[in-house]
Amino acid sequence: MGRSIESGDWLRSLRPDATPRHHLLCFPPGGGPATAYRDLAKQFGAGIAVSSVQYPGRQDRLGEAPITELDTLAERIAGEVLKLGIIDRLALFGHSMGATLAFETARRLEREGQALTALFVSGRPAPTFVETQRVHLGSDSDLIAELERLAADPVPIQMLRDEPSLAELVLPAVRGDYQAVETYRYTPGAPLAADIVALVSTQDPTMTPDQADEWREFTTGTFDRATFPGGHFYLDERPAEVAKVVAEQLAHNRSGM
């Protein structure tokens, strides 16, 4: 069965399980900390251990410079996972920037012999999509405006305008993540062996359901799409529904049991 992933600098345990049947490693969206998936982790039952990645430049890693190149970030994360040895029945989940990062990490893990049961990609077009925005080059006000545009509730983002000292702490990591996304370019390669499930919402200004379907080309396994009502951060409002989709997919994949 194996143990849950223990917390370290890069990987944080959100829902340990003494005898997990599956391990789910989550990749936060741009600007987000590992705890962004705390509510989602609470929705899973016994047998699913949930961990999350803590990127440099936030929370207890605030003093570290953000990594502004997505491929470099994927290399570092894959290296941390591979240090743990082979993990049975490992799946990855990423939202927004985290979806692309989870995909690039998955490529590196599979190349090194770490099998994955599934890749869950949420709120992000397929890797061949070229981001034309250059938010990371704009002013702090421009960056905050982009966060307000995507937020389910823009009121908390207003704090970044009202409290410059808070913005000074938070925005460097956000800007670094936007730079990583906006400068990312897909390098062609073999599709993943892992199944892919694309999750998309009906009112996401960053993508469409048709774009979610393009993820089908990046796996030799099965592909499915799950659609939810809401905006870009729909999963903050529907953690139980998202967890149900994930748990059902993992239950269907019994390889190695």
Image (spheres, rainbow, N blue to C red):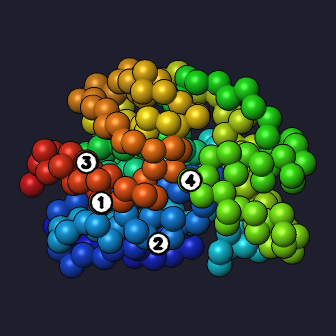
Name the spot of residue 111 as percent of width and height, x first. 41, 39
Name the spot of residue 64 as percent of width and height, x first. 75, 69
Q: Residue at x 71, y 66 (%)?
A: 57
Q: Which residue is mark 2?
A: 12
Q: Residue at x 84, y 46 (%)?
A: 142
Q: Residue at x 20, y 69 (%)?
A: 45
Q: Amino acid at mark 2?
A: Arg
Mark 1 neighbour class, 10 Å CA radius: few under 14, some 14 to 19, many 20 or more: some
SS of the residue under disc 3? helix
Mark 4 neighbour class, 10 Å CA radius: few under 14, some 14 to 19, many 20 or more: some
Q: Looking at the image, is mark 2 or mark 4 earlier in the sequence? A: 2
| Residue 31 placement, left or right of 128 | right
| Residue 257 placement, left or right of 60 | left
Q: Which residue is mark 3?
A: 245
Q: Which residue is mark 1?
A: 240
Name the spot of residue 211 as percent of width and height, x first. 47, 24
**Camera-side residue of 160 and 89:** 160
Q: Which residue is mark 4?
A: 152
Q: CA distance from mark 4 to mark 3?
A: 21 Å
Q: CA distance from mark 4 to mark 1?
A: 17 Å
Q: Amino acid at mark 4?
A: Ala
Q: Nearer the viewer, mark 2 or mark 1?
A: 1
Q: Nearer the viewer, mark 4 or mark 3?
A: 4
Q: Residue at x 29, y 67 (%)?
A: 43
